[in-house]
Amino acid sequence: MKKFSFTTNVGQDRRFSIKAVDLLDEEKCIAYLDSLTRSLQSPSRMITASQFSKRYAFLTIAPSLYAMTIYNKGLDLSSENCKIESSFHNGSWKSNLHLTDLQVSQPKEGERQEWRDGVIKNIFHGNLAKIWRSISKVSNVPMPILWENTAVRVYSLYEKKVGNGDSEKEKFRIQEDFKYLISEAPATLFGETKNPLARFYGPKSTISSSDQPVRTRKTCCFYYKVPNGNYCSTCPKVKQ
């Protein structure tokens, strides 16, 4: 799980590390985002919030959904159990996810669908939805941007990182889990009124700036406004 920036170590630099639950506190959330804004030389708290959400979505989604689909293991990704361990090296922000409790759940025979719903709800309803509402409130970054930043991490995980599976059983589980997440999972599992992963999923198309077909975003993440940043190949503001 190291490839997903999952760590069991506690970072030494506490300035840029924070408990996820502290992001639900307005004052602590503002202080953390403003600290990142200064360190990243970001033009605003809103731009920082969008960039942070992409990293936080990866840190939480990648290890948890990978464990769920590949290993049939459920990690506790509730906001109360997550900590961001991070530091700056040569102007670059390095961050990892640390879980206080490493116990995992497993589905009982014949009850994987119910277990899967619990795992998904723990990740999204119990963590990301609450964090996104808090971040949106203090930074004015629109919720659709935060949810599309989340959605693209899910798509990337299943389309690029999970692989095809080592057996027919695993291959089926990968395809079925992905389909469920992006089209069938009820909105209540995400803490929203509509499934936010389904909203941004669409067909890929060939564009001039990419050799491979891409799924053009519906919202802009504002990465081009960060120092040394650029327009993403999937940015809706770029003429395709």
Image: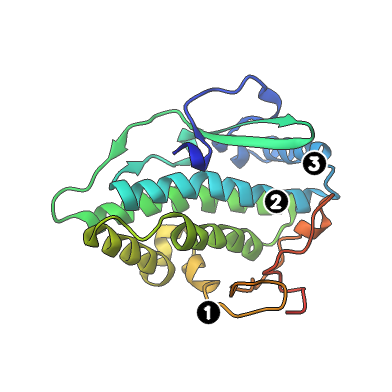
Q: Secondary structure at mark 2?
A: helix
Pair 2/1: label in front: 1
Pair 3/1: label in front: 1
Percent across and percent down for residue 124 are 46, 53
Question: In the drawing, what numbered circle is on residue 32?
Answer: none
Percent across and percent down for residue 163 are 40, 57
Q: Earlier in the sequence, mark 2 or mark 1?
A: 2
Residue placed furthest toward the front: 211
Asked whether the beta carbons under mark 3 and mark 1 sit within 8 Å of each other, the answer is no
Q: Secondary structure at mark 3?
A: helix
User: Which residue is at the front of the view, 131 or 226?
Assistant: 226
The C terminus appears in which quarter of the rendering?
bottom right
Percent across and percent down for residue 112 are 22, 55
User: Which residue is at the front of the view, 214 or 55?
Assistant: 214
Q: Which residue is mark 2?
A: 51
Question: In the drawing, what numbered circle is on residue 40?
Answer: 3
Q: Earlier in the sequence, mark 3 or mark 1?
A: 3
Residue type marked 2: Gln
* Residue 197 can be seen, yes or no: yes
Residue drawn 36% across the image and 46% down it: 67
Q: Counting other residues with Cα less than 10 Å from the Cα at mark 1, is it few (<14), some (14-19), or many (20 or more)?
A: few
Residue type marked 1: Pro
Asked whether the beta carbons under mark 3 and mark 2 sit within 8 Å of each other, the answer is yes
* Residue 185 can be seen, yes or no: no
Q: CA distance from mark 2 to mark 1?
A: 25 Å
Residue type marked 3: Leu
Residue placed furthest toward the top: 12
Asked whether the beta carbons under mark 2 and mark 1 sit within 8 Å of each other, the answer is no
Q: Earlier in the sequence, mark 3 or mark 2?
A: 3
Q: Which residue is mark 1?
A: 203
Residue drawn 65% across the image and 73% down it: 218
